[in-house]
Amino acid sequence: MAEHQIDEPKIAFAYLRPSCVLLTKQPTVANVKTLSGHLRDVSDGALQQLQDYILFPLRFVLKTPVPKREALMLAVMEAMCYVLENTCVRRWESLRDLFSELCLCLCSPRDPGKPAATSEELKLAVLGCLDALLHSAYGDIVFKLYEPSMLPGLGAAVSLLLAIAEQEKARGVQTASLQCLLCLFQQCDCTQDHVEPGPNQRGLLGCALAAFLPGICRALTLVIGGDVRQGHVVTLKAMRVWYRSVALVMADEQNGNIGDDVSGGEFEGVEELIVKRTPSWRKDTSQRLSLVLQKIISCTSAHPHWKVRLELVNLSHVLLTHCSRSLGECVGPLLEALVGAINNEEAEVKNRCDVVLRDVAQRSQVNGGQDFTGVLSENLHSLVSSLPRLMRTTDDQRKLFTLNVFLGYLQILGAKVDAVLTSAVHLERISKALMQVLELDVTDVKIIEDRTLTPSTDLGPDVHRLQPQKKYFLYFTDDKIFSALRKICWMLGYYGNLYLLVDRFMELYKESSVYRKQAALVLNEILLGAAGIGVKMNVSGCSRSSREEIKSSVVSVIEEYISFNNWHLPTVSQDLDDETHGTLGSPVYTNPDKKLLQLLPASRSPTIHQLNSNIWQICIQLEGIGGFASALGLDFRLLLMTSLYPVLEKAGDESLLISQSAFSAMCDICEACSYGSPKDLMIQNSDYLLNDISLNLARPNAHPHAPRVLGVMFAHSDASLLPLVADVVQDVLMALDLSYDQKTPQFCAVLHLLMKALVRWFPSSTVHQKPNSTETRGEGCVNLKTFLLNYKKQKELSEGIGVEEEDPDDLDVSPLTLTPDEDVDGPAVKEELPLHVQIAKDVMERCVHLLSDSCLRTRLKVLDILELCVCVLCEKENELLPMVHRCWPALLHRLTSDDPLAIPRAFRVLCVLGETCGDFLRKRVSQEVLPRLTSSLMKQAEVSGRSGPVYTHTLAYKLQVAVLQGLGPLSVKLNIMEADMDRITEACFPYLSCRQPIKLQEACLSVFRHLMELDADSCWFTLNEIFCPVSYEPPHPHLLPVMLSGSHKPKNQFTDNILELLREFDPPQGKT
């Protein structure tokens, strides 16, 4: 722009005239640009007076019927836009003509109803020029566009702009066309000054737009519901055009039909375009707009961009403020949109929603003056009625929005929720909706498969809290949806009548097994909400429930949870239970209470679906008890006498889900009642726990799970518990003796946990050190001369030579024979055994009998117990050896004639026995065990040597590995004789073959390495007899050469492993 512009109109006219004349004669791009350059040298005041003269050549170029290049059109639009932005259009005729000409530039020459197939740049330029024209209209001349005589032209312009917004793919063009529509409807939100329409002008504008409202709604709904990739700005602009258009047409202030008394005048056909906004028309239009509004809300309520969600709040505000009476059918969806945004994750959307809701409530203009609470209650009822259908048919985003609306209604109603719940219809709808929405998916077979993998009884006493179990629902997968449902329950509990809610959901809990899990979920969360847990502190009002009401409700719910019918549900099929527990049956079938059979008919076994459902029901009830503890805090200590024992009972359950849920409940109880750990919880409450255990052990048929509780206490306590449970342990052993055929697996499980605890509490101080092989060989190395002299002396003695020459003084008298009066004070008194040793001895006595049990699982468990007993008794040899003598026959049978699964376990017990009492067992093992084991190894070596890779998955292979891995250490611990070494060497030799599986070769090498510790020379000689890699030259000519059987043999299948073993000996003196 020039520094000094021309202010005088006459001078400006003379300055611009040549350019205008030249452009009229020669419409070229250069001439247009020349005129544009000259325009910038003229002031705005001069341009205003010369506006028509300057625009004439530019309009002339547009009117020329010849085809025009795009560059020329762009240059004309740029020049025209500059003029319109810096001047005002004062004459109606100029505004009308320019408006028509610019619209013609946008439409197709052949089909004026469709946009022209021009470039994006040209469309943007024309739309920009049209926007500048509408902004430059002076005074109220722009409102003549909305007179009846202009309806055809106005309709064509609106249709054209809507078509561009709907069909154009370029975001910039779509946004520009929507901005033009805002300007055309006098709803522009830019920073420029605008003419504010008065009541009559708004009526005229609303009457004009009423004729185009169906087309506006159709096109903009398509744009709003378009692809998300079109960008949030396009969606936002389309929403703004839609709701501001609707607010003009359906404004409450125009209920008196202001502007509807106009006529078409002298123009024929215009009368048909005029819409009379009668009450019936408004009602019909409101119903139609309600459908459109629901479509828009469904597309934008869960939009990824927060500004679109914010615009939805503004939409609801504008329509509720200006059209609440006219749009009676739309009030519900509008309130629903607002309520759904009250829990929006974006703070700006949430804050704006709060402001709007307060404003709407204060205006009391909802639905023709109806009470705001009443409308919210009706909307809540309508929403709850459709909630199950929405949960089944919509996607997760829509489900989340629907639940946020539900939650928002509860938050807005606040303390008035209680008034809503007192309506039986409302309460029925809400409760049944929650039952259907929260239905769990219990079809996953892994629920019942996850058994005893990492149960809580195998965890240490000070482990941390486990992760909560993830629940899977039938009708949704997003965790945010479950979180919203939990918040809904919290709000119900916080504001509602607690007794009423608990009674209703307890009624559903008892009504049918179909609702039981969902009802328990809701009860758990309602009681948490009543205590204020999970409820934000900024909610209006306070909890209606007193501490005593919460406590009373918790007591009644826990009593129902832990009742026999709901606590002792079958979690494993009877067939599997019989197979794994011998004759042990599920307590369901021995229960005299016939009501329990409502879930499971006695005539058939439960299905997988039923078992999974029972598992989840117990887990939910355990979660509830943990949550109740959090809700009551220290007051929950008074309920421990009734609730702790059942929780511990489930902590020992075989189901992984149940045991972990029980342990989580224990952690919640510890935190709520100020116990440092589950160990402290059980020790400080051990008095009545042990009393219950002792009583229940005396009635095993009525209380079959008492051993589980004891096992959990062992797993999570320390040695301070032992004196307290000593009598109970004796009760367990007595109960085992009395009901040995029925309850053996359960008692064995608790005895196993007891022995594991004793090993942990009283670690053995005996350290079994491995003898150093180098020192052993060094002690065995003697001087050759000494060896020969001793040999000569022994040979003479054997022949009777030199016996009479022995010196009597050389006979040593043992010092033990010189002290015959050791116990002169009296008879020997047997030392009293420590408590843990006495218990281990008593348990081991039972193992002697149970080792021959007919159930394989019991035998395996007894072998584990026996191993732990040996570890506890290892320091008391006088007690251990008689017990080993008693259990040896049964153990020998397990080692030689049992199932392939039991033999490795029995062999492991034998290895432990060998470590603690090797001398006592040496002869027994040599005569009764090694012959059978080595014979079996030799026979199986032929099979494994020619087998394929599948063989490594067989029981025979696993048995070979177990025996070979334990045979070497056992030989060292027993210090076996030379004959036994030869037997083992012979049996293991085939496993040195490279044709054997790798793991068997490695185990065999381990056997030979242990044998080297016993007799390295014998091993070296044996290996060289098979394959000798070097030849040995005599150190003196008089000595004969040493010829080993393995010399000069070719390499074979044993060579590699033999060479590896020979390298571990001292390098021999030889020559390769």
Image (cartoon, rainbow, N blue to C red):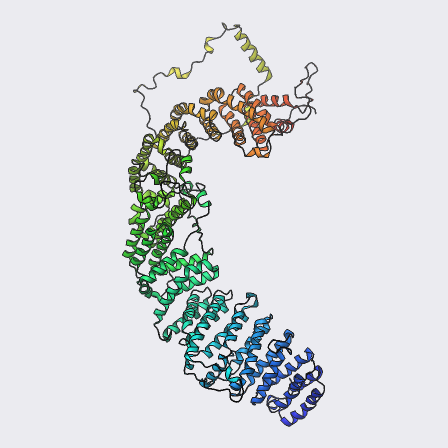
Which residue is most to the bottom? 10
User: Is residue 70 placed above or below 928 in the rendered structure?
Assistant: below
Task: Tally the marks.
Answer: 0
Left or right side of 54 for 602? left
User: Residue 606 appears at what percent x and percent y?
Assistant: 40, 42
Left or right side of 949 for 853? left
User: Is residue 355 placed above or below 1071 in the rendered structure?
Assistant: below
Q: Quadrant of the N terminus?
A: bottom right
**Front residue of 415 and 271:** 271
User: Residue 491 appears at what percent x and percent y?
Assistant: 36, 61
User: Is residue 410 placed above or below 898 in the rendered structure?
Assistant: below
User: Residue 418 appears at what percent x and percent y?
Assistant: 31, 63
Q: Quadrant of residue 1006?
A: top right
User: Residue 750 appears at what percent x and percent y?
Assistant: 37, 36
**Front residue of 446 and 158:** 158
Q: Quadrant of residue 484?
A: bottom left
Residue 383 visible in the snapshot: yes
User: Is residue 682 placed above or below 426 in the rendered structure?
Assistant: above
**Front residue of 507 and 175:** 507
Residue 4 visible in the snapshot: no
Q: Quadrant of the C terminus?
A: top right
